[in-house]
Amino acid sequence: MSADKRIAIYGGSFDPPHLGHRKLVSFLLENFQNLEKILIVPNKLSVFKREKYFSPQECFELCELNFSDLDPDRIIVSDIEVTKDSPNYSYETILEIKKIYTNYSIDLVVGEDQLLDLPHWKEFETILQEISRFIVFRRNTVPKETIPIPSSLIGFPLHICENSLWEESATQWRNWQTAEILHPPVAEKMKENSRIKFNEKVLETWKEFAKKENTKSRFDHVEKVSILSQELALSNSYLFPEKAELAGILHDITKQKTKEIHIELFDKYGFTNYYDLPFAAWHAYSGKYKIIDEGIDDIDIQKAVESHTLGRKNMSLLESILYSSDFLGSDYAQAHPDYSEWIRLTHTNLTFGKYIKSKNTIQNLLEKKQMIHSNTLDVYNESAQFLSKE
Ligand SMILES: [Fe+2]
Ligand SMILES: [Fe+2]
C-alpha cells in the first residue's frame, strides 16, 4: 500500500448513537493521530439484524450531532449507506469509499465481539484486499487481556485498542428512554422529533377517537390515565412525555368491545394464544392490534398498550408508566384512603406503582377465587424484591 494518508471506517447501527460510541471516537482521535479522517457510517438496516428503531435518516442526523463536534476537521458522518434503496454489505461500502478516497489507506474499526464473525462476512477476501488493517476496540475484555483472534486473521494487521469498557448500550437506551446515556444535543433532537410527530393536534385527534370508542365513564378513566402517564413520564425523565400521554389515551381503546371484535383482531394479526389469557386482559392485546390498524406505528406505545393489564417481567419505562397509571387512574384506587400516598410513592419510585398494582390485582383475584396470570406474579415478585433491597 503506497498511500500515505489514513482513513478509518467506523460503521454500525447507531440506533441510537450514545455516549459509548462518542467515547470510542474520542479514543480513536486521541490515540490514532495518523488517522486523517474517521468516517462514521450508520447503516440502513444491519444485514444480520432486525429493522432499526430509528429510521436510517434519523440515525444519520443523530450521528452528526453525536460526533461532529469532537473534531470537525477529522470526523465525517457519511450517508453512503442510509441513502441506498436497500441495505448493503460492508465490502460494497468499502469499495465505494475507496473510489472517493483514492490515495488513502483504509482502516476498518470493529468491536471485539465482531472479530470472530469477520471471516464470515460477505466477500471477506475482498475486504482483506482493500483495507490495510483492522482497528479492534474492546467491548467485553478489559485492557491488557488477550482477545481471541480467528485463525484466518493471524498475520493480518490488527490493532487491538486498550480502550476502557463502557456501560452504555443502545439496547439499554431503547428500554429506558431517558437522556442519561446520550450526548445532550442528541437527546434534544430526539425530543424535538417526538414533539413534532405527536404534537397537540395529533393528540387531540386521538382523544376524539378514544371518546367515540368509549362510554363517558370509561373515557373519564382514559383521560385520568393519560394525565397520570404524562406526569409520571416527567417525574421519571422519560424523554417523550407526549408518547406517554398518547399511550394513556389509547390504552383501553377496545375495552368495551365484544368478544367477537377481539377475536376478529386476533385473527387478522395471527395471534392465536388468546385463550390462555384471562378475558379481562384480552382488550390489552386486541387494543394493540386496533391501534396498529389505525396507523400507530410507534412500537413503544404498542408494547405499553399490550402489557398495561397483565404487565410482564422487565417492562420498559413507558410500559411501567402506563401499567402504574392505569391502576392509579382506576375508581378503586382513587377511592382508597391511601391514594395520595400511593401517588406520592409512585412519583418517587415507579417500582412502587408496579408493586401496588400487582399486589392489589392478586388480592382481588384471590378473593374472587380466580386464577392469577404468571405475568402478574412476575411483576409482583420483581417489584417486591426490588423494594425490599432499598
Ligand atoms: Fe385496560
Ligand atoms: Fe384502563
Image: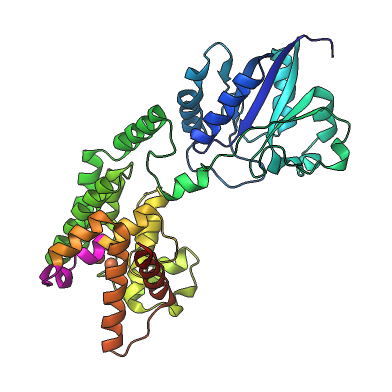
- Looking at the picture, how far across and down is residue 299, in whole percent? 42, 51
> Is any atom of residue 293 visible in this view?
no
Q: Name the quarter showing ligand 2.
A: bottom left
- Asked if the stretch drawn in magenta spans residue 334, the answer is yes
- Residue at (69, 17) in percent of width and height: 7
Q: Is residue 376 above or below residue 26?
A: below
55 relative position to 101: left or right? left
Q: If the image is split into quadrants, where does the C terminus sit?
A: bottom left
- Looking at the picture, how far across and down is residue 175, in whole percent? 44, 50
Q: Is residue 322 above or below residue 257?
A: above
370 relative position to 326: left or right? right
Query: Viewer-proximal residue, 128 or 162?
Result: 162
Residue 13 appears in which quarter of the rendering?
top right
Residue 36 appears in which quarter of the rendering?
top right
> Is any atom of residue 308 visible in this view?
yes
Query: Viewer-proximal residue, 40 or 347?
Result: 347
- Residue at (71, 27) in percent of width and height: 108
Q: If the image is split into quadrants, where does the N terminus sit?
A: top right
- Looking at the picture, how far across and down is residue 15, in whole percent? 51, 38
Q: Is residue 366 above or below residue 167?
A: below
- Looking at the picture, how far across and down is residue 323, in whole percent? 31, 62
Label the magenta part by its dominant secondary structure: helix
Residue 101 appears in which quarter of the rendering?
top right
Q: Is residue 197 above or below residue 260?
A: above
- Asked if the stretch drawn in magenta spans residue 6, the answer is no
Residue at the farthest bottom position = 369
- Residue at (16, 73) in percent of width and height: 332
Q: Which residues are magenta?
A: 325-338
